[in-house]
Image: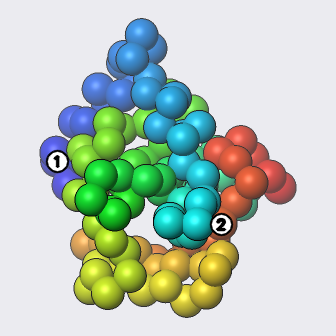
Amino acid sequence: MIKFIKDFITVLKSPHYPNWYIEKAAKPSKTHPLGGFWKQNQKHDFGLAIGKAPGGLYYISFCGPGGCFAKGEYRPNSKIIDDPEYIVIDHDNIEVKGKFGFSKYTRSKNRENNK
């Protein structure tokens, strides 16, 4: 948890390197249908950017108003399907395992508040 907080502060303090390309590249495709932006609450301006990574894997990066974590920094790259850290409920809903168990994420149009 301390590493997460330190990394998050680094992202907020680094306006020259916000990694916005990570959010923009998080799109679904035929090979990576789970690509996109995922939120726990559609009213939030932060969530998970999930996109194509090498080796048929996905990158999972936290993005907020200050930018995104670099690929592989927030969570390790994963195939998501058949990974015990994730549960795919359907095309637009997944659960991600955290310190206190699983949390549900829903696919979103983008990071900005969708109210």
Q: Is residue 22 visible?
A: yes
Query: Which class describes the residues within 10 Å of circle 2: few (<14), some (14-19), or many (20+)?
Result: many
Total of numbered circles in the picture? 2
Q: What element carries label 2?
A: strand
List x then y, in percent, for residue 108. Answer: 70, 59
Q: In this view of the protein, which residue sits in the foreground, 24 or 111?
A: 24
Q: What element carries label 1?
A: helix
Q: What residue lies at 39% left-to-right and 49% top-to-bottom?
A: 61
Determine whether 14 is above or below 27 in the image. Answer: above
Q: Is residue 21 left or right of residue 109?
A: left
Report the residue marked by disc 2: 107
Type of the residue with mark 2: Arg
Quarter the C terminus occupies: bottom right
List x then y, in percent, for residue 57. Answer: 33, 63
Report the residue marked by disc 1: 2
- Labelled disc at residue 57: none
List x then y, in percent, for residue 89. Answer: 55, 89
Determine whether 90 is above or below 68 in the image. Answer: below
Q: In the rendered image, which quarter is residue 99 located in?
A: bottom left
In the image, which is nearer the foreground, mark 1 or mark 2? 2
Determine whether 38 is above or below 7 in the image. Answer: below
Quarter the N terminus occupies: bottom left
List x then y, in percent, for residue 77. Answer: 27, 58
Residue furthest top as drawn: 16
Type of the residue with mark 1: Ile
Determine whether 74 is above or below 86 in the image. Answer: above
Mark 1 and mark 2 lie on one chain; the one further toward the N terminus is: 1
Instruction: Measure how far apart labels 1 and 2 are at the Cα level.
Output: 28 Å
Q: What residue lies at 36% left-to-right and 38% top-to-bottom?
A: 69
Q: Can residue 60 be seen in this view?
A: no
